[in-house]
């Protein structure tokens, strides 16, 4: 498998760069690691964000809502840059608009899943495109390795941590298998209680 790194639209990159240069955006709690950084803040590893709504849905019905960039802090002194946050932009009629910064466990898990994807890419010849898949109905997010060409190769999903009960984070699942498993382990929404 080889990874086809997606190229975000220029308006998505401009929105992230604008947020990194905006004092109000950097006041968000998730941007704490970015404030007062002594080196350059670099948006890297753009992932198209797709949302899969509702029970029993298939990947073909996932809709793209925007892009998420990992923000690396490159220190002034020699040394490896590290991911300090992620920035998400949403699609608008005029292009893209900054939405929010994120931090926490999904950030580290995304970095780990991308490393897994690159390792998989070295062991196979099929081509996959990394995407981010949000499944709000299952309280789950996964790195989606999409195969863009028809044929026997299948899309793969790597659930990010924390994963829902019954799902193993960072296990590589064929997409159909994980979606079926999520359906079987779905927790029903609480019933509305009527008061008379």
Image: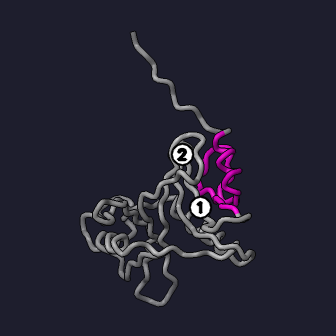
Which image quarter holds the N terminus? bottom right
Residue 49: percent from left, percent from top: 47, 60
Density class for disc 2 (Cα within 10 Å; few <14, some 14-19, many ≥20) is few
- Residue, x 54% and y 45% (percent of image)? 139
Most distant residue in the bottom direction: 78
Instruction: Answer with mark 1 or mark 2, whichever residue precedes in sequence.
Output: 2
Residue 56: percent from left, percent from top: 60, 41
Looking at the picture, the colour scheme in use is one colour
Secondary structure of the residue carrying tag 1 is: strand
- Residue 34 appears in which quarter of the rendering? bottom left
- Residue, x 44% and y 65% (percent of image)? 68
- Residue 188 appears in which quarter of the rendering? top right
Judge depth for marks 1 and 2 and give the one in front. Answer: 1
Estimate the spatial distance between the alpha carbons at disc 1 and disc 2, rounded to whole Å. 16 Å
Q: Is residue 142 left or right of residue 29?
A: right
| Image mark count | 2
- Residue 85 appears in which quarter of the rendering? bottom left
Provide the residue span drawn in magenta.
154-183
Secondary structure of the residue carrying tag 2 is: loop
Residue, disc 2: 139
Is residue 97 inside the magenta stretch?
no
Residue 44: percent from left, percent from top: 46, 76
Density class for disc 1 (Cα within 10 Å; few <14, some 14-19, many ≥20) is many
- In depth, the one of 125 and 60 nearer the eye is 60
Q: Residue 162 has which mark?
A: none
Residue, disc 1: 144
């Amino acid at each position: 498998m080889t990874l086809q790194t997606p190229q975000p639209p220029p308006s998505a990159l401009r929105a992230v760069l604008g947020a990194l240069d905006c004092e109000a955006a950097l006041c968000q709690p998730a941007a704490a690691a970015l404030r007062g950084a002594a080196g350059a803040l670099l948006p890297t590893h753009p992932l198209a964000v797709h949302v899969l709504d509702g029970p029993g849905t298939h990947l073909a019905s996932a809709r793209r809502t925007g892009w998420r960039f990992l923000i690396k802090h490159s220190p002034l002194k020699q040394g490896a840059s590290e991911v300090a946050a992620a920035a998400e932009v949403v699609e608008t009629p005029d292009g893209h608009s900054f939405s929010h910064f994120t931090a926490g466990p999904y950030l580290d898990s995304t970095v780990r899943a991308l490393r897994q994807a690159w390792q998989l890419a070295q062991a196979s010849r099929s081509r996959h495109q990394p995407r981010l898949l949000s499944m709000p109905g299952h309280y789950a997010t996964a790195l989606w390795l999409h195969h863009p060409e028809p044929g026997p190769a299948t899309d793969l999903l790597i659930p990010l941590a924390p994963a829902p009960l019954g799902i193993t984070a960072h296990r590589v699942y064929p997409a159909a298998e994980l979606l079926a498993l999520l359906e079987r382990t779905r927790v029903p929404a609480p019933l509305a209680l009527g008061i008379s």
